[in-house]
Image (cartoon, rainbow, N blue to C red):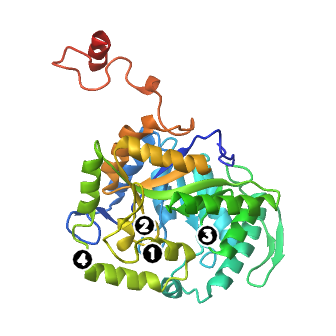
Amino acid sequence: MSDHAGSAGGEADVLWFLPTHGDGHFLGSDTGARHVSIGYLRQIAQAADELGYFGVLLPTGRSCEDSWVIASALAPLTKRLRFLVALRPGLQEPTVAARMAATLDRISEGRLLINIVTGGDPVELRGDGVFMDHAERYAVTNEFLHIWKALMRGETVDFKGNHLQVEGGKLFYPAEQFPYPPIYFGGSSGVGQEIAAEHVDVYLTWGEKPADVAAKINEMKALAAARGRTLSFCIRLHVIVRETAEEAWRAADDLIRYVDDETIALAQKTFARHDSEGQRRMAQLHGGRRDQLEVSPNLWAGVGLVRGGAGTALVGDPQQVADRMKEYIDLGIDRFILSGYPHLEECYRFAELVFPLLPLKSTTGKSRESRNAVAFGEVIANAVVPALRQTSQS
């Protein structure tokens, strides 16, 4: 079950999100909040699996439940769903990370995806014992990936770098996917892009304006081509889709109903300490202001007022959201990582409303043949199948 292939004729895969750092109906408030138990995460994972999502992203950091533990708990409870789980250079040794990855890939029967996260909050990193600056962290990431990839290929590794050293490193039990599970990575700084071009399979960007995404993709294609490599491209977005555009925009406004100016100022002050170029670009879209949040047609920056990382959402009716996604596909995006609040309901809503309007790869979505043999939808008056009634009236 390999996922190393690039874009396939303007089609895309869609992943969902497991909210291991919290969920609810509103941002920046405990009103309408939801307890994120293993039972609730199981519901989301199984819904995503049943609906045909390609996989799920598990976030990482001190505000989250541990992504490896959660993925290990949920893998046996799902059938084909892939788990995009973070490896953290600087927090993990590459040898131990290789054993972890190989084990989870085997027990999930080849359903592991790897997300390399270097980290962008110096305060959080110091709390985890990492006291390196931005450049040093990316240097460690580069050495980490050299070692990790060699181990996953089955090589005996002797490596001495400026930061990491291994003598006689070896992985005795290989991963299901050869040579290793697909590597995702998001880095908007120059050094991050160089590492992506050298090492990764899927370059990940947060949801920026199409022109800015196009510029990133073109730059990354050139950097990869200079190394004789090609990349796939993934975009991380929230979605707020409703039957009508008016309903969708009301839902967007409602999502930040309890976000006041004080909360925004507190969040933006925290984000300002980050040395992440991607986070800077997210903050630049709204500037901490709530009066001009639609930064591009149907692209809304309201989430980023209080949420770190991915801060934009596609807002609109199903056709509008699908059209915006097709624009990104035309630029070269061949997979999307989406989320919405609350994540269980929105997982269903997006799949039911938008999947039928998208050019999806065979690895996302479910065919009509997977439906019940006859009845699809509640039988009318216990006697009439809806689909048969529609056929007779057409």
- Answer whether labels 4 and 2 touch (C-beta < 8 Å): no
Residue type beneath disc 1: Ala
Residue type beneath disc 2: Gly
Marks 3 and 1: which is nearer the front? 1
Can you identify the residue that label 4 sits on?
Answer: 260
Q: Earlier in the sequence, mark 3 or mark 4?
A: 3
**Of residues 201 and 130, which is closer to you in this image?**
201
* Residue at image point 65% right, 81% down: 137
Can you identify the residue that label 3 sits on?
Answer: 187
Can you tell which mark lies on residue 242? Answer: none
Can you tell which mark lies on residue 311? Answer: 2
Q: Earlier in the sequence, mark 4 or mark 2?
A: 4
* Residue at image point 51% right, 77% down: 280
Q: Quadrant of the N terminus?
A: top right
* Residue at image point 24% right, 25% down: 378
Query: Label 2 vs label 3: CA separation?
Result: 16 Å
In the image, is 41 to the left or to the right of 54?
Answer: left
Can you identify the residue that label 1 sits on?
Answer: 283
Near mark 4 (Cα within 10 A), the count class, few <14, some 14-19 or many ≥20, is some
- Answer whether labels 3 and 1 touch (C-beta < 8 Å): no
* Residue at image point 44% right, 25% down: 368
Near mark 3 (Cα within 10 A), the count class, few <14, some 14-19 or many ≥20, is many
Query: Label 3 vs label 1: CA separation?
Result: 16 Å
Q: Earlier in the sequence, mark 2 or mark 3?
A: 3
Residue type beneath disc 4: Asp
- Answer whether labels 2 and 1 touch (C-beta < 8 Å): yes
Q: Residue 40 is drawn in which quadrant?
A: bottom left
Percent coordinates x, y for residue 14 in the rendering = 50, 47
Percent coordinates x, y for residue 211 in the rendering = 56, 59
